[in-house]
Image (tube, grey):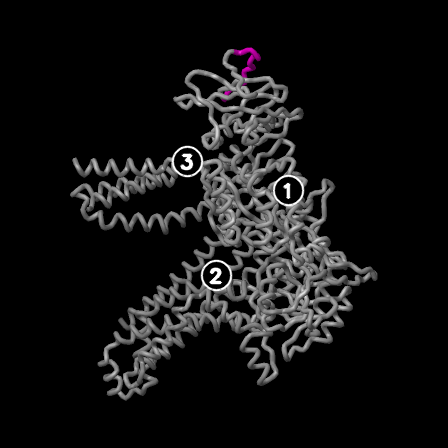
Amino acid sequence: MKILLLGIVDAVVVWAGVGLGTQNAYALLSLLLLGGVGLNIAILSRRAYPLRYLLPSLLVLFGMVVYPILYNVYISFTNLQTGNLLQKSQVIHLLENRYAPAPEETIYAYQAYLSDKDELLLLLTDEQGQHFLSQGKTLEPLRPDDQRLVTQDGTTGLDVPGYHAVTGPALYQLLPRLETLAIPVDNATLRLSGIRQFKTVIKQYSYNPKTDRLVDLQTAISYAPVDGRFTSAAGKTIEPGFQTWVGARNFVRIFSSAAIGKDFLRVFLWTVVWAMLSVFLSFSLGLSFALLLNDRKLHFRLVYRTLLLVPYVMPVFISAFVWRGMFNENFGIFNRILGDLFHVQVPWLTNAMWARASLIMINVWLSFPYMMLISLGALQSIPDQLYEAARVDGAGAWRRFWSVTLPLLMISLAPLLIGSFAFAFNNFTLIYLVTAGRPAVLGAATPAGATDILISWTYRISFQGGSGNNYGLAAAISILIFVMIATISAIGFRMSRHLEEVYG
Amino acid sequence: MKKLLMLVLIIALAAVVGAAQTKLTIFADDTRTPLLRDLGAQFTADTGVEVDVVEYAWNDLRSAYVTSTQAGEGPDIVIGAHDWVGEYVANGLVEPIDLGKKVADFSPAALEAFTVNGALYGLPYASENLALVYDKDLVPTPPRTWDGLLAICRAVADPEKPMYGLAFQNQAGNFYQFFPFLSAAGGYIFGYDDKGALNPCDVGIATDGAIFGATLYQSMLKEDLIPSGVDWDTLNALVEGHNAAMYITGPWLIGAIKSAGVNYGITQIPAIKGPNGAYNVPKVFTGVQGFMVNSFSDNKTIAMDFLMNYVATMDTMVALMNLGDRAPAYLPAVTQAGPDILAFSQQAAFGVPMPSIPAMASIWQEGGNALDLINNGTDPATALKQAQDLILTAVDCK
């Protein structure tokens, strides 16, 4: 059983390895092999017994968490963006296979033959009826009276022992192989240009790996790789560009760009306010419900608790759209009611302050059940004796809450609240689904809307503006956001440790 | 020993599974996937080449294609909109194609839309654009001029009911729908450089004509002739409730209009009288859809064979037309087109292909923000000039 499972895992590793190997992804391949070998040793060797429990989780942790983070850091130091998407080797492959139409185009019909050993033989016939023979490397003219030529039913074919003609479906299987052929003829190259024909074309570029130069074969101009693009001495560039290392340029751009600097403070402040208020309000609401539900005198507690969990179990995708619809200025339910009763129209999502308030309302609705759940759990763990002691000391309900319940709750809940803060800080989904960062702000220097938080602003700068997608810049900004959240969380944890020292 | 043998056998099996046959892979959207699967089955029967059609939602096709092709796992053929081609070409992901003699069968405007730097990158099958769709019960004769449209709007509009004169998707950021207002009196997206290519440094969304059109739009908004904040869901609700007399929309809304039982007609968007007194029909964006070939495909010849002999045929093109209710790009199929398609085509005479160059991303972003500001009452000149400045900065022209 164990061996069967290991066999399946090994098979997957080999399959994935072959895939990675053919794509030249050697870094991932070596990791995969290392992991695979390690796994085999851990399971087959008796001495490595404890490892067999640790290793799989470590591997998954590495693959799902550490590797993406490292990759993100790597991307932030590259120029990966629209126009510089491919690897250099891919671009060289593309350019070396780029052909221009020949000035005097010649079209050859062909018939393909294969030997039993899969050797290729082509009979090519140009428009004048002149026959040629090729094995894929050169073109060899045939005299009309060549012995190997056989004419049958008006069509001429080849009769070479050991070779058979390829037609029908077998020809289609052969086409990818024929497509790779580039047969030199005079000043041109012969390439497959249709199911049944070859055509003369002119090869445009040739790459010299020794000098790292791309040469235009027609003009003899040499192009050097500069900044992810093959560039001539005169500054002419060839599309497409490729990924390349650009050092700290993306970071420099963030800090030196006047436009980004101008909007940063506004977006950052709103992000902090948004995260703080979301956590504070939803925790207050959740805790209030938890206290109510914790009262044993309350009837139908299970029913209430189930109902209160509904916002939490609804997918954000659905509730965000429902809320957006309800907040619609002309047709939303809120403005219908307000309009009918008081003849007022609240610009829920179109006025900056209202849009922010609406978002916080929605987020409180979405997250208070979670706060309620964790508070309920933590409330159970507070021993009744403490309350009794407080009561004996003459503390009222209010005092008992502030002096006993809340401090003891905070010990266990503070780390969770910090987690919620970090989550709200980066809650791209909700912002994007409800307002997409809008309404727009007059006088903004970048596409920073009134409700954009740092992460949605990053998205708009990197993917929705400029000239397409800029992954390098996005990666750099996300690293900075990570640093911010890490700092805020570290401070939070330090403070919560004080709580523990005081009350724990 | 037995265990080891078993291990070796399983590994060997995995290696064998890795070997592959020639196969044509196509990325297509959900609407066109069934048709392509049928064509693929026919192609397989004729040539023995297996055809694998991978289904995506239309909105996911673009990123799925870019990501998979970059990783060397892209399809041989992909369906897409012409305005994605600019990005594909900049990234080197699509191959120029040669339609040979069949080129004469295609609408020149559709071919033009798929042309980047003089090379054709797609075999077009359909084009779509906005037009005026009106409720015949409320608007017996469609207006020819914008003044006529305003008169009808004022006659029918009643925000309490609610009933609006004209509705379209003007929710935050929908610049596509806003463009007709800007273009009527002379706004444009990009100018051309001396070689005839689009010049991202010449942006015309804040010209006097554009500001004139935007001001006209804002005044209709203030008069409650147009509802604001209409997104796709709201638009459908308006159609369902017969809450508007006229819509500026595309073929994608016709299904909803039919099922709501609206007695509809389709016509040109009425001409707007510009500041110089001349009447101009608002220009709309045309979007063309087509098939493209992956530049990294090992089966380009087979892919082209499939496209030329199985897709670029009367039967397939008519089927594609009926699937999407879009105007065909294949001219012989126009004879089979229904009245709705022909009506939308009238407006297409006043269409400009959506620019496909990557700088268009900035137009969508900042143009959309400008519409947002105008909706919220900002002076159109201020909003559009800010957008123009920000676009020029974002595409490094300033």
Q: Which amino acid lies under the numbered mark 3 shown in the image of this protein?
A: Gln
Inspect the magenta stretch and tell me whether residue A54 lies in it. Answer: no
Residue at the image position 57 percent from the left and 57 percent from the top: A261
Residue at the image position 61 percent from the left and 66 percent from the top: B257
Q: Nearer the viewer, residue B23 or A504?
A: B23
Q: Percent from the top left, x then y, of residue A220? A: 62, 25
Whether labels 3 and 1 belong to a single chain: the reply is yes
Chain of the residue where label 2 is placed in the rendered structure? A
Q: Percent from the top left, x then y, of residue B181? A: 71, 61
Whether labels 1 and 2 belong to a single chain: the reply is no
Q: Percent from the top left, x then y, of residue B307? A: 56, 40
Tell me, for residue B116, which label it has, or none.
Answer: 1
Q: Nearer the viewer, mark 3 or mark 2?
A: 3
Q: Which span is picked out in magenta?
A: A136-146
Tell me, for residue A428, which label it has, or none.
Answer: 2
Residue at the image position 63 percent from the left and 54 percent from the top: B128
Q: Where is mark 3, residue-wise?
A: B21
